[in-house]
Image: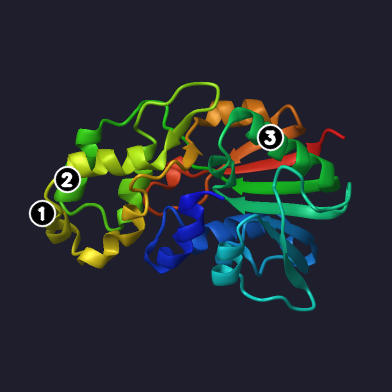
Amino acid sequence: MSDLWANLFRTWDLIKAPLRPPVDVVEVLKSLIDTDGAEMALLGVTPELARLGKALVAIDANPHMIGALWIGDSATRKVVLGNWLDLPLPDKGIDAIVGDGCLSAVTSEAQRLRCLEEMARVLRPGGRAGIRLFARPAKTEPLDAIRADALGGRIKALAEIVLRTALSLPVAAPDYGLKMSAVLDAINEMFGDRKALMAAGGWQPDAFAFIDLYKGSDTICCWLNEAVHVAEASHYFADVRLVPSGTYPVADRCPILLLGSPRQ
């Protein structure tokens, strides 16, 4: 079990968009997928997505996240302790899959491909998946630009600093993996004096609690660009598209990967 995922639930309420999906994302997913009539799977227990669908099963490997974040089982929705690389679902058994950042949360190219393969396996013919990505921009953003925006009061959520920093640090193909401790190190180097950052953003010291969980963590997340995501998904889906996920800050780096026509 990853040390970060085992503890992140403790500071969940401090995490804001773009690391958590705002209402824009939910509305876009509803417009792309017939959620009202769909039997669905959710990769993870993201509360904002857990009420989609006529029926829904959520799959998460971390009992701490399930215990803290799951909205509760009912007649139409339940949570299962399971692995996205071996989904506890039958072949061609569901209408739709949704997930938020899940292709960044797996740690290698091999795991991403296996996750996509599993999604294709469990979708019925005509089924769709909508996965919000965290995608590197075509041109890497300099860290100085993030620092200037933050100290200039133009960033309203620490989550934006985290995502922009993670998408700006160097990573290597084919995994594009980066330890989250390296993201914290870069943030601390940019903002050696948190008092100035707090003053610019209007944040209190406890707002940094979720970032400080990254300290010394070996947890790896993957930060690849849109073209690689599309190429990988195309191995398992004949219809692969990128759709804007809304107008919230940094939404341009958080498109929905819409997957249809699974290759079965």
Q: At which x and y percent is residue 209? A: 31, 61
Taking the image as shown, residue 159 lies to the left or right of residue 232, namely left
Q: Between residues 160 and 26, which one lies in front from this camera angle?
A: 160
Q: What element carries label 3?
A: strand
Q: Nearer the viewer, mark 1 or mark 3?
A: 1
Asked whether the viewer can see residue 21, the reply is no
Q: Residue at x 19, y 40 (%)?
A: 190
Mark 3 belongs to which amino acid? Val
The residue wearing badge 1 is 196
Splitting the image into 4 quarters, where does residue 103 fall?
A: top right
Instruction: Give neighbour class at mark 3: few <14, some 14-19, many 20+ (Cα, 10 Å).
Output: many
Residue 242 horizontal/vertical position (percent): 59, 38
149 vs 179, nearest the viewer: 179
The residue under the point 71% across, 28% down is 234
- Disc 1, SS: helix
**From the viewer's perspective, is 118 left or right of 146?**
right
* Element marked by disc 2: loop
Query: Where 172 falls versus 36 (above or below)?
Result: above
Hey, what amino acid is under mark 2? Answer: Phe
Q: In which quarter of the image is residue 182?
A: top left
Residue 68: x and y in percent read 54, 70
Q: In this view, does 14 lie to the left or right of 152?
A: right
Residue placed under numbered mark 3 in the picture: 240
Precedes in sequence: disc 2 or disc 1: 2
| Amino acid of disc 1 | Ala
Q: Nearer the viewer, mark 3 or mark 2?
A: 2
